[in-house]
Image (tube, grey):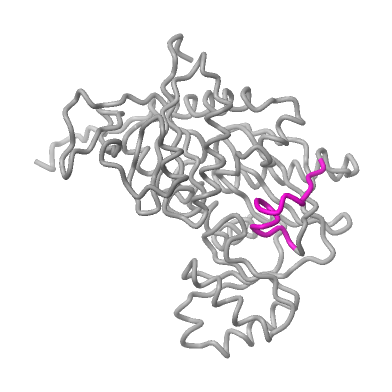
Amino acid sequence: MPKNKLKIAVIFGGRSAEHEVSLVSAASVIKNLDKSKYEVISIGITKEGKWLSSVDTLKLLKAGNKGNHEVEKILIPDPSQRSLIKVNGQHFATHKSKTKIDIIFPILHGPSGEDGTIQGLLELADIPYIGAGVLGSAVGMDKIVQKDILRQRGLPVVDYVYFLKREWLTNREALIKVINKKISYPLFVKPANMGSSVGITKVHNQKTLAPAIKLAMDYDRKILVEKAVEPNRDIEVSVLGNDNPKASVPGEIISSNEFYDYDAKYVDGNSKAIIPAPLPDKLTQEIQRLAVETFKALDCSGMARVDFLLKGSKVWINELNTIPGFTSISMYPKLWEASGLPYPKLLDKLIRLAIERHREKSQLKTSYRPKKNWYK
């Protein structure tokens, strides 16, 4: 890493139902970044999509600020800039208002941030960033595409079906028959592109199926219905690395509710984490292997958390999260701390991995010289 302080921009907030979770994660990351090594730049995206940057950005977003023209800035997809540029009305300000950035840490949970959209902008801007690239982020966000890929790789996932909102509205009875035939109750109904258990319902009978689907459709046009494993244990593993990723010790979640929903994760404070999970050594190693294989199958880099369902010695991959929670109670940093890598050192490692990946990609050719100038 450079001898001078790296200017690291932490991006948080965003146009997602997980906006509030992002704010808490970002506050924890900013607190734990070593200020002797890094100059931290806060970039907050409001629920309306405005980009703000100042020393008070986190406070502004927590207060529900919809836009402050004094601190409104934008990152443009021009690789010669690599800067935040202040916006004056409808115009960009002069070069004196530029804020140079060395690396970006996106802490944007959910759509319009964790799904490859912000990663695409950062690729165009040619700025190193932490976490999965465009492809890994996109397939990691979409639970349906993710499960299709894992199933094709021969990795264990529960039985599932999926459909579009339009199909439900036009052919509801036929879809109910398919669900009843392929997926027995209890089952889970989920929006395909959402995290933090937002929009998810555990359904015990056909009577409550339609309301659950209606709720999921509030958040996505793609709906996933999958078999519930009962009884089950919720096991989580953190993965860290690029081409040669490593898995942390597994942890077990004891949910305060029937399943690990939004309230159980963030609100009531009654869920418990057991780290390391009390598992036989052989089963621990198998879960760690599956976590790394899942990470590779979905073309991830930097970091991810892989969640499992466990019944006896039978393991299923529930899902992978490319930008896991980074709050003070989040499993991703806690699992690495239990594996011997404390939170500040984990952030250092993630930054090195992002620089390593960017340097490797920068060595690729971006032009081709044909034998004839046929295009002129």
106, above or below 190, in the image: above
Q: Estimate the x, y position of residue 230 in percent, counting from the top left.
A: 82, 66
Name the residue furthest bottom: 173
* Residue drawn at point x = 75 percent, y = 75 percent: 186
Q: How many marks?
A: 0
147, above or below 367, in the image: below
Q: Estimate the x, y position of residue 372 in percent, counting from the top left.
A: 15, 36
Q: Is 336 on the left-hand or right-hand side of 56?
A: right
* Residue drawn at point x = 82 percent, y = 38 percent: 276
Classify the position of the C terminus by image quarter. top left
Name the residue furthest front: 63
Q: Quadrant of residue 264?
A: bottom right
Name the residue furthest top: 3
168, above or below 194, in the image: below
Q: Start and end of the magenta stretch?
A: 259-274
* Residue drawn at point x = 26 percent, y = 36 percent: 70
* Residue drawn at point x = 85 percent, y = 45 percent: 283
Q: Is residue 172 magenta?
A: no
Q: Is 317 on the left-hand or right-hand side of 222?
A: right
Q: Is residue 261 magenta?
A: yes
Q: Estimate the x, y position of residue 63 in percent, counting from the top left.
A: 44, 46
Q: Is 85 on the left-hand or right-hand side of 187?
A: left
Q: Is 324 on the left-hand or right-hand side of 311?
A: left
246, above or below 108, in the image: above
Q: Quadrant of residue 93?
A: top left
Q: Estimate the x, y position of residue 250 in percent, counting from the top left.
A: 78, 41
Name the residue furthest left: 376
Q: Quadrant of residue 80?
A: top left
